[in-house]
Image (cartoon, rainbow, N blue to C red):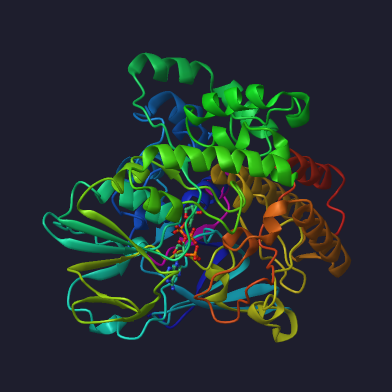
Amino acid sequence: MSSEPHRHEVVIIGAGVSGIYQIKRLVDLDIDAVVLEGDDDLGGTWYRNRYPGARFDSESYTYGYSWSQEVLDEWDWKERFSGQPENLHYLNFVADKFDLRRHMRFNARVTSMTWDDDEREWTVELEDGDVYVSRFVIPSLGPLSMPTLPRYPGMDEFAGPSFHTYHWPKEPLDLTDKRVGVIGTGATGIQVIGELADKVGELKVFQRRPNWSSPLNNSEISAEEMAEIRGRYDEIFANCAESPGGFEHVPDWRGFWNLTEEERHAHYDFLYTQPGFAILVANFAEIFFDQAANDEISEYIANRIRERVNDPVIAEKLIPLDHGFGMQRLPLETNYFEAYNRDNVNLVDLSEAPIERITATGIKTAAAHHELDVIVYATGFDAITGGYDRIDIHGVDGRRLGEVWKDSPRTYIGVLAHGFPNLFMIAGPQSVSGSTNFPRAIETGVDWVTDLLVQARADGRTRIEATAEAEQEWVDEVVRAHERMMFRRSKGWFTGYNSNVAGHQEGKIRYQAYFGGAPRYNQRVTELAANGYPGITVA
Ligand code: NA7
């Protein structure tokens, strides 16, 4: 720890996908900035999630950065949905290419931030006692950076390795012949289960609720195809900017009810073989708004599960009954359903017999004790606001952000929060990031924040804050967008619910993301900038 605070004009918190781009923009503008990263290296999500099977659900070339022609020219994606090691390699390639590491400090975990309204600056404190003082802070915390564990008795007593998927060990872990238990069947659990099934001695899947899932349909990208992709980058990013989800897939607007059932089924058959989220976002838009339309696609996917899982009793247990297809974040799978056809894979249905405790040798449910060598918690995240909650943030008059956001976050366009001047959130709550292809929206956020900063500096202004009225209007718009969606009745992180987080109440929505679609959001923020930033006080 040094006795004098470090001074920079801008502190960026987090060296993941957002932080890397944000520091690049500021370095290019010669603005004095530092990135504080809690981990011992860069990469964020792709540094942490090292579990087997971790990969993009977005097409690699729609996930990668669009802002550097050199990177687009030089980087070859090898798979349509690239895996974690390659993704981390990519982020390192970008950071090293532009020599960004020298602006990053690692093992620099921010614990608190306090705004001084007289000096117009933030004091940022680290876990190790170091202090940074800056005019502006840009949290680039990542929407899924706060893993959550269940609260079962005995979790500390388990004798073998046990960890959250986010903390999968860096050192190689030999699971051959091991008895492995996976708790959780969300997007992460479904990836890890499909990958591990044929690589471990025995796999027990502890499922509280089944999730809908459809094939990822991954494939290699040949040199010829990469050349074709490279020639199409402008078009790819333009397509992403125009689609509600930020993907190349666009909804089918032919109209669900304008087609016969046979025509609709032919479309589902086609989409089921298509890569990525096509089955969801290139489907009929009505599946998100019209119960009958959603029932039909749900039954279609249920029948696909019945076709793929040999044991009819297990198949029914894997079909969700409490929510329709696409009403929670859709996991994409590779060999997931086939895993249950293997002799070494067993489904433990927690809805019939819940977990009572973890023991030294395994997991005890109400029905049986399951002997295990390794326990993997694929139990999700305190999504979107979790990263903010673990920093004690005090704004004007000492107001605590965690307190203001206790029931649900409040922001202006997901970037600013009234009472917290000069704090610019990238992929913040109520932005479009949480509901679309993350990096596309991240780039929008970074560019928008950078432009605002540049303009304020040019005008000699030092204090930027959203008005209370503008914030309220945005919150109302976020709520209205939620109300249009049927998924508002589902559990899960889209509606801000996590059973392992104290204070979250089942059935009470936390409005964490804007679901009005990327084009509408982009238009809105572009207009704000063009019109001189109404709703924002720049002084
Ligand atoms: P998710 O989608 O939140 O899934 C978490 C899973 O863990 C889900 O199946 C939960 O069951 C289960 N869970 C959570 N707590 C428990 C307890 N206490 N006991 C048993 N099972 C539990 O997180 P993921 O990591 O899979 O995905 C997060 C995002 O990462 C994903 O959307 C992608 O964007 C990447 P539940 O359904 O709540 O009953």
Quadrant containing the N terminus is bottom left
Of 197 and 223, which appears nearest the observer? 197
Q: How many marks?
A: 0
* 66 on left or right of 338: right
Quadrant of residue 521 in the image?
Answer: top right
Q: Is residue 29 magenta?
A: yes
Q: Which residue occupies the extreme left position in the image?
A: 177
Provide residue 55's location: percent of width, then percent of height: 38, 44
Task: Tell me if 414 is positioned left or right of 233 in this view.
Answer: right
> Which residues lie in the magenta part?
26-39
Q: Is residue 155 above or below residue 20?
A: below
In this rendered view, identify the residue nearer to me: 282 or 6.
Answer: 282
Residue 257 in picture, x, y percent from top left: 77, 30
The answer to whether residue 276 shows anywhere in this view is yes
Which residue is at 43% across, 36% downward?
A: 216
Q: Identify the residue at image location x=57%, y=70%.
A: 388
Task: Work out whether residue 217 or residue 416 is closer to the camera in this orientation and state it.
Answer: 217
Where 118 falls versus 9 (above or below)? below
Residue 460 visible in image:
no
Residue 469, magenta (yes or no): no
Q: Quadrant of the C terminus?
A: bottom right
In the image, residue 443 sits, relative to residue 217, either above or below, namely below
Establish if 72 lies above or below 464: above
**Residue 497 in which image quadrant:** bottom right
Residue lying farthest to the front in this orientation: 312
Residue closer to the observer: 33 or 409: 409
